[in-house]
Image (cartoon, rainbow, N blue to C red):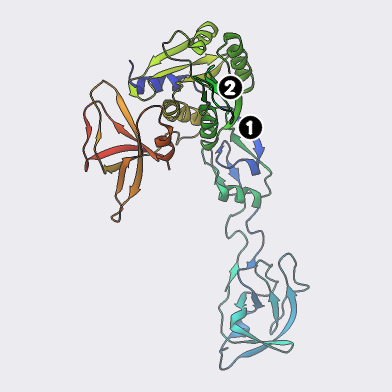
């Protein structure tokens, strides 16, 4: 067996960041920026009002109060998207809506709540200072400023900034296309009654969903029979159309592990027995320069192997510096026992937070590698180093699924 860290290092050595590409801003959520973005215009591009109210000259409101209002004639109305018909003169007011350009001559906005209609005039019932409720041009972003830098993970706000600058495309490290295939004559799909020895394929939909959740572009390569020619065709299709391929099943030490036979014939692959439980068997290598992950067939083993090897490695391919899941410390709410076997165990747990803000972890169900329900209800993997495990009340490190 080899150590987990050694297996992860083998994977990461062969995974390179994908080349940058220009993609539509609308499709860039969660992707990593590969350029410096500078503002070629100010945001906002003009001084505008932060309130519905009246554009005035601050000097014309001097001494105004509710008890002694000052009446000003309303000479125009400025809606958002329009401009004043002329400059504002002394002793005048213009009705103005939020976001509309402040007219030339005005230096303050008085909010509508501090005014009262008076025929064609408006009664000003408070004194306001110059600059009141005015958002200057460039108040958010100054023209020429460098506002986004390579390595930024683009969130909704970043995309909004790009759109406000008129950007339709942005240069990013693209999402890897990740092909997923299941193999095995025992696997079937759909609701038809199972025949003796058959089980329904759950791994493919699980791994495709994990790939999508991680920010990749999942590609379904199908359910492949235990036939070397069919497996080779599926693998060659995958490496020709995807940035990485994930297989499920057929990578252990049995006589009928056809994926192992095909990959051994096609390329240089590492066949690893990793010192972990579950997910001990792992295959990794390059086929036509495309990384291929051979994950075990047991459902939980497949998911744990994806979390420990495929997910972080493929996120590095898309330029993510936060490739790893966060690790947290939690208090064990119950014993998490194990026996010494030279392996690190990953127990499926559910983490909560108590009234004191402390994280607490309990087992989410049965811990067999075939017991998918416990993985489905888990939000973390408790890391149990080689030893006897932990007792209730002990602190345990958890890979946390945020």
Q: Position of residue 89 (x, y in %)?
A: 72, 80
Residue designated by label 2 = 223
Judge the density around disc 2: few (<14), some (14-19), many (≥20) Cα neighbours within 10 Å: many
Q: Is residue 245 visible?
A: no
Q: Is residue 350 visible?
A: yes
Mark 1 near mark 2, Cβ–Cβ under 8 Å? no
Tell me the distance, in whole angstroms, between the alpha carbons under discs 1 and 2: 32 Å
Residue designated by label 1 = 21
Q: Is disc 2 placed on a helix, strand or loop?
A: strand
Quadrant of the drawing holding the N terminus:
top left
Counting residues from the start of the chain, the first of labels 1 and 2 encountered is: 1
Q: Position of residue 205 (x, y in %)?
A: 55, 31
In the rendered image, the residue lying farthest to the top is: 265
Q: Is residue 393 left or right of residue 206?
A: left
As drawn, 146 above or below 79:
above
Q: Nearer the viewer, residue 107 or 83?
A: 83
In the rendered image, the residue lying farthest to the bottom is: 67
Q: Give the numbered dot on residue 107.
A: none
The residue lying at 27 percent from left, 28 percent from top is 385
Q: Position of residue 210 (x, y in %)?
A: 51, 33
Q: Quadrant of residue 53?
A: bottom right
Q: Nearer the viewer, residue 8 or 402?
A: 402
The label nearer to you, 1 versus 2, is 2
The residue lying at 68 percent from left, 49 percent from top is 166
Q: Is residue 323 left or right of residue 240?
A: left
As drawn, 226 above or below 246:
above
Q: Is residue 364 left or right of residue 182?
A: left
Quadrant of the drawing holding the C terminus:
top left
Q: Quadrant of residue 307?
A: top left
As drawn, 89 above or below 289:
below
As drawn, 325 above or below 117:
above
Q: Is disc 1 placed on a helix, strand or loop?
A: strand
């Amino acid at each position: 067996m080899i150590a987990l860290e050694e297996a992860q290092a083998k994977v990461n050595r062969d995974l390179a960041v994908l080349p940058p590409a220009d993609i539509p801003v609308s499709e860039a959520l969660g992707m990593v920026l590969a350029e410096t973005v500078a503002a070629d215009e100010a945001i906002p591009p003009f001084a505008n009002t932060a309130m519905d109210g009246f554009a005035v000259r601050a000097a014309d409101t001097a001494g105004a109060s509710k008890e002694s209002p000052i009446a000003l004639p309303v000479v125009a109305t400025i809606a958002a998207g329009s401009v004043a018909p002329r400059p504002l003169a002394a002793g005048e007011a213009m009705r103005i809506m939020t976001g509309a350009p402040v007219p030339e001559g005005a230096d303050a906005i008085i909010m509508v709540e501090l005014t009262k209609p008076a025929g064609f005039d408006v009664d000003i019932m408070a004194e306001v200072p110059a600059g009141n409720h005015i958002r200057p041009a460039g108040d958010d972003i100054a023209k020429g400023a460098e506002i986004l830098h390579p390595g930024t993970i683009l969130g909704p706000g970043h995309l909004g900034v790009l759109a406000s600058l008129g950007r339709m495309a942005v240069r990013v490290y693209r999402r890897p296309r990740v092909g997923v295939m299941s193999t095995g004559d025992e696997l079937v799909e759909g609701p038809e009654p199972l025949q003796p020895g058959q089980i329904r394929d759950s791994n493919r939909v699980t791994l495709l969903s994990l790939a999508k959740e991680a920010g990749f572009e999942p590609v379904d390569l199908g359910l492949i029979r235990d036939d070397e020619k069919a497996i080779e065709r599926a693998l060659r299709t995958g490496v020709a159309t995807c940035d990485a391929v994930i297989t499920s099943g057929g990578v252990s030490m049995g006589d009928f592990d056809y994926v192992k036979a095909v990959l051994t014939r096609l390329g240089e692959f590492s066949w690893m027995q990793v010192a972990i439980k579950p997910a001990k068997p792992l295959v990794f290598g390059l086929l036509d320069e495309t990384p291929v992950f051979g994950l075990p067939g047991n459902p939980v083993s497949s998911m744990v192997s994806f979390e420990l090897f495929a997910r972080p490695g493929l996120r590095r391919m898309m330029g993510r510096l936060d490739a790893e899941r966060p690790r947290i410390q939690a208090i064990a709410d119950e014993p998490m026992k194990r026996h010494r076997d030279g392996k690190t165990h990953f127990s499926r747990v559910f983490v909560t937070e108590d009234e004191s803000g402390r994280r607490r972890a309990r087992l989410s169900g049965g811990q067999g590698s075939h017991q998918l329900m416990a993985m489905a209800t888990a939000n973390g993997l408790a890391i149990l180093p080689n030893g006897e495990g932990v007792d209730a009340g002990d602190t345990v490190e958890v890979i946390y699924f945020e």
